[in-house]
Every structure is written in C-alpha cells, then in structure tokens.
C-alpha cells in the first residue's frame, strides 16, 4: 500500500515537473503547437509583394495546414488552396511563366508566390482592408463586393457573424486567430 502511494506521488511530481517545464518554456511549446513551415519562402514572397508574412502563414495554416498536395472538394489546390482558374488568371496578369496544376499543387514556392500575389491584389482592391481581403480570398471578391454594397456585412471583424456564407465566417475567424498567434510567437517572421 505504501509503495503504491509512493509511486503515485512520484508520478504526480514528475507530471507537475513536466507541466512546469512546458509553461516555463512556453515559446518552445507555442512553436510546437503553431509551427510555421516554409518560413524562408514566406519571408521572400512577403517582401516581394509587401504582404504581412503572418497573414501569409495564417492563410496557409487554415487552407492546408502547411501540407503540400492538398486538393479541396471544389478543386482548390496546394498550400494556399488556389483554384487553377485563379492561378491562370494571375499568370496572365504577371510576368510569371505558365504553370501546370501539378506544379501548383506540389511546388510550395510557386503556390506561395501566387497566393501571396493574390492576397496583395485583394488588399489593393479593398483599399488595404485585411479583414475584407481575407473574406474575399475565401468567398471571392464578387461575393464580398455584393455583401458590402447591399449592406449585408459592413466589412468589420466584429460583425463577421453577418457574413452570409458560414464557411467564410469561420474562415475569417480562423485566419485572424492564427494571424494573431503567429504575430505573438514569431514577431520577426519576415
């Protein structure tokens, strides 16, 4: 009986010690819970297109959880889940070379470049408003313009619950959640 109590106490002390170390090393734990892959590529494309690297990382986290080769049921592909037609549209407007769907799906640098360019385009279209641009990245700028013009949604984060598409409502909340986490954990991501 005494041996069992001693073992339980020892096990409890070990668990308390581990939890204490994890809280002391909260940066270590935070980086494990919220990893950012492709940091060099994100930093490079962030600088090239002047888009906050934390936003790029947050979009990637929500879209694909940093997993290349992803394809959505609607056909969006790669890390930043771009529709092939959107990627073609971007290529037509830039000096980028033509790309295949396989490249878009499996090439992290190419996918991040196109996704970052598109975020920049949306930010310019919506006068630098990050919240509206995030909604447009998910629902398309046409839908967002309609919501804004019909006053269905005012474009504010605090009223994101008014966004007519449930997927987009959740998307905006998730991206902002990860954006804030990444700013806190990785203040020098760029």
Image (cartoon, helix red, strand yellow):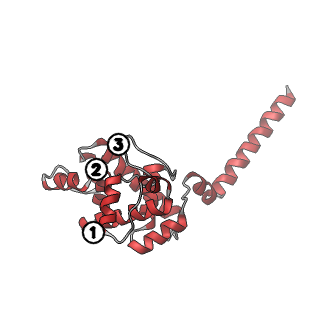
Q: Is residue 147 visible?
A: yes
Residue at mark 3: 74
Count of numbered badges drawn on the protein: 3
Are there few (<14), some (14-19), or many (20+) residues within 10 Å of tag 2?
some
Label 1 – label 3 distance at C-alpha:
26 Å
Specify the quadrant of the image occupied by residue 117: bottom left
Q: Are marks 1 and 3 in contact (CB under 8 Å)?
A: no
**How far across and how far down the image is residue 190, in percent?**
49, 71
- Taking the image as shown, residue 150 lies to the left or right of residue 135, namely left
The disc placed on residue 139 is 2
Q: Secondary structure at mark 1?
A: helix
Residue at 50% across, 58% down? 107
Q: Are marks 1 and 2 in contact (CB under 8 Å)?
A: no
Residue at 28% across, 55% down? 136
Are there few (<14), some (14-19), or many (20+) residues within 10 Å of tag 1?
few
Of marks 1 and 3, the one in the foreground: 3
**How far across and how far down the image is residue 102, in percent?**
46, 52
Q: Are marks 2 and 3 in contact (CB under 8 Å)?
A: no
Q: Secondary structure at mark 3?
A: loop
- Taking the image as shown, residue 156 lies to the left or right of residue 175, namely left
Label 2 – label 3 distance at C-alpha:
12 Å
Specify the quadrant of the image occupied by residue 141: bottom left
Residue at 62% across, 54% down? 29
Residue at mark 1: 124
Are there few (<14), some (14-19), or many (20+) residues within 10 Å of tag 3?
few
Of marks 2 and 3, the one in the foreground: 3
Upstream in sequence: badge 1 or badge 2:
1
Farthest right residue in view: 3
The residue nearer to you, when weighing 50 against 176, is 50
């Amino acid at each position: 009986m005494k041996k069992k109590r001693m073992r339980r106490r020892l096990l409890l002390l070990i668990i308390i010690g581990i939890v204490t170390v994890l809280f002391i090393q909260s940066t270590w734990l935070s980086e494990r819970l919220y990893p950012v892959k492709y940091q060099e590529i994100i930093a490079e494309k962030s600088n090239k297109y002047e888009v906050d690297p934390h936003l790029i990382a947050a979009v990637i986290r929500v879209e694909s959880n940093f997993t290349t080769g992803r394809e959505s049921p609607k056909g969006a592909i790669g890390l930043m889940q771009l529709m092939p037609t959107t990627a073609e549209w971007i290529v037509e407007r830039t000096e980028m070379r033509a790309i295949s769907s396989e490249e878009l799906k499996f090439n992290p640098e190419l996918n991040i470049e196109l996704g970052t360019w598109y975020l920049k385009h949306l930010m310019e279209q919506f006068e630098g408003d990050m919240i509206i641009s995030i909604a447009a990245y998910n629902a398309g700028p046409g839908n967002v313009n309609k919501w804004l013009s019909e006053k269905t949604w005012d474009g504010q984060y605090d009223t994101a619950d008014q966004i007519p598409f449930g997927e987009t409502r959740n998307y905006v909340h998730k991206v902002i959640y990860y954006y804030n986490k990444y700013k806190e954990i990785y203040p020098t991501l760029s």
